[in-house]
């Protein structure tokens, strides 16, 4: 007995929503009951790479392209004016197809679509200059859109002055080319925007401003250098930033931030400049782009601007390169009065120079999470670790009220054990320490019986509950 076919139409249409539109259309041959269900499916996912198949040369054939476009026309005609929740379109088109594309988009917008995902490329051949599909102005005059995702190949700037998206809550730009001044206009036309994702946006300008009074979540990945990057986002709660450091951060307004994840990228040359700032790196024979950003005083000021702007954050994640950058403003580091949870990721090629100042400036820290204890040893690691013997051993740790420490990526070395003991000796309020071995590296399998015995001894000698999860 076919139990699936006995389900209500609404349930069957919901099931079909999880399939691509091509797959959903194929179900019409199963039985009479399935023949017209596609007309009421509220989610359409159309991908011509799936429709055309990956056979070499097939997608360039005009008859195949025509059959794809005819298929989309038939689906939209079959659905008529039925309500549509989501429309996802991924295709490679040529200039002759643009009117048809505009018609498809106008069709779904007229039916009240709330989630629109467009990835349209005019040319598959990378040798052809990057001509963009100019998105129809109607896409920016829609009162029903709640989520809009635009991918590589789409040009949006030419409609910057015709925007009206009053209900849009989520905007995702993925590898889209945008002029900074057009971007400002784009955000101003979205009074309800709550989530903004900028993935490797190709900025046609060096000064970018992210300004939105309603924005709550911002994810930003920078694939190029910027001269200035400002954030006027007073309602922001969640912030993820990765990519290259900008030359300056004139405005960083994030007074209500709850959590932030900062992952800056540094080249090997930039690392040398950060660690040896007093050397003359630039002469008449050497020209490096954006070299002024690596002037020591400028970096200190700019990094202070950035971190001062996020100083109210409650949960902060810092990656290895970010720790190196932050070390440049250790002497002027802001106080993170609201910070409850700090997570850092270590790398054997990146140092801990910033850790002493960072721990001293977190007066209400409760949880410290460390991904990997192994880090690059410098003479500026300070007293936060035991890499270098010093008279003020552990001093910065004594100012940190952390209660719980979680260590991931433990390798079972004596150097790590010494650092763990260092934490136990000098964190005055530490009550719980959880240690998790590196994946596929169980200390007992390595024959480290001594490590297990040392953990037992630490538990006996310390008031902290130390647990090794193996």
Image (tube, rainbow, N blue to C red):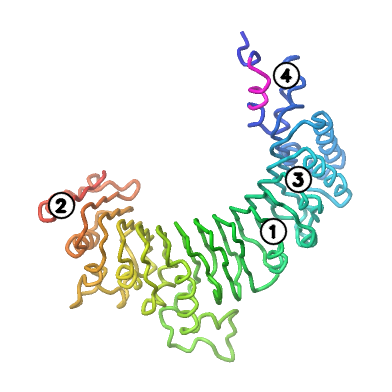
The secondary structure that dominates the magenta segment is helix
Residue drawn at the location 78% of the way across and 40% of the way down: 108
Mark 1: give few (<14), some (14-19) or many (20+) Cα within 10 Å: many
Q: Looking at the image, do the residues carrying marks 3 and 2 touch, with CB atoms under 8 Å apart?
A: no
On residue 450, the disc is: 2
**Which residue position holds label 4?**
34
The answer to whether residue 59 is left or right of residue 9 is right
Q: Magenta part of the protein: which range?
A: 7-14
* 331 in relation to 433, above or below: below
On residue 176, the disc is: 1
**Which residue position holds label 3?**
91
Chain-order first, disc 4 or disc 1: 4
Inter-mark Cα distance, 3 to 2: 60 Å
The answer to whether residue 194 is left or right of residue 264 is right
The answer to whether residue 466 is left or right of residue 34 is left
Task: Give residue 420's quadrant in the image.
Answer: bottom left
Q: Where is residue 404 in the image (x, y as percent from the top left)?
A: 27, 54
Q: Position of residue 308 (x, y in %)?
A: 45, 72
Inter-mark Cα distance, 1 to 2: 55 Å
* 232 in relation to 237, above or below: below
User: Can residue 364 be spotted in the picture?
Assistant: yes
The answer to whether residue 280 is left or right of residue 470 is right
Label 4: state its secondary structure: helix
Residue drawn at the location 63% of the way across and 50% of the way down: 169
């Amino acid at each position: 007995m076919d139990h699936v076919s006995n389900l209500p139409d609404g349930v069957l249409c919901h099931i079909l929503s999880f399939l691509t539109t091509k797959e959903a259309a194929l179900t019409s041959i199963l039985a009479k009951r399935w023949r017209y269900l596609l007309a009421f499916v509220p989610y359409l996912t159309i991908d011509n790479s799936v429709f055309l198949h990956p056979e070499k040369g097939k997608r360039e054939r005009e008859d195949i392209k025509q059959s794809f476009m005819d298929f989309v026309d038939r689906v939209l005609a079959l659905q008529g004016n039925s309500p549509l929740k989501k429309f996802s379109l991924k295709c490679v088109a040529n200039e002759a197809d643009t009117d048809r594309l505009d018609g498809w988009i106008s069709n779904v917008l007229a039916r009240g679509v709330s989630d629109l995902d467009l990835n349209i490329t005019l040319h598959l051949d990378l040798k052809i200059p990057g001509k963009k599909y100019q998105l129809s102005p109607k896409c920016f005059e829609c009162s029903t859109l709640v989520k809009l995702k635009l991918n590589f190949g789409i040009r949006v700037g030419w409609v910057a002055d015709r925007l009206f998206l009053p209900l849009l809550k989520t905007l995702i730009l993925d590898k889209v080319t945008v002029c900074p001044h057009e971007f400002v206009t784009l955000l101003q036309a979205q009074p309800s925007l709550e989530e903004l994702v900028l993935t490797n946006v190709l900025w046609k300008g060096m000064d970018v401003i992210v300004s939105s009074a309603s924005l709550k979540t911002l994810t930003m990945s920078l694939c190029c250098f910027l001269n200035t990057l400002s954030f006027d986002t007073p309602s922001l709660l969640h912030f993820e930033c990765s990519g290259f450091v900008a030359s300056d951060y004139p405005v960083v307004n994030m007074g209500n931030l709850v959590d932030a994840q900062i992952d800056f990228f540094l080249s090997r040359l930039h690392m040398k400049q950060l660690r040896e700032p007093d050397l003359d790196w630039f002469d008449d024979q050497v020209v490096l782009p954006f070299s002024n950003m690596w002037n020591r005083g400028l970096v200190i000021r700019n990094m202070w601007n950035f971190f001062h702007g996020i100083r109210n954050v409650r949960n902060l994640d810092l990656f290895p390169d970010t720790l190196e950058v932050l070390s440049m403003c250790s002497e002027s580091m802001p106080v993170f009065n609201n910070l409850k949870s700090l997570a850092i990721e270590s790398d054997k090629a990146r140092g801990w120079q910033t850790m002493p100042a960072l721990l001293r400036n977190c007066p209400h820290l409760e949880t410290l999470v460390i991904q990997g204890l192994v880090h690059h040893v410098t003479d500026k690691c300070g007293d936060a670790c035991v890499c270098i013997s010093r008279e003020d051993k552990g001093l910065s740790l004594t100012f940190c009220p952390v209660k719980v420490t979680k260590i991931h990526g433990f390798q079972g070395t004596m150097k790590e054990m010494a650092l763990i003991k260092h934490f136990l000796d000098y964190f005055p309020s530490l009550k719980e320490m959880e240690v998790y071995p590196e994946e596929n590296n169980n200390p007992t399998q390595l024959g480290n019986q001594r490590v297990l015995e040392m953990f037992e001894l630490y538990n006996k000698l310390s008031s902290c509950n130390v647990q090794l999860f193996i």
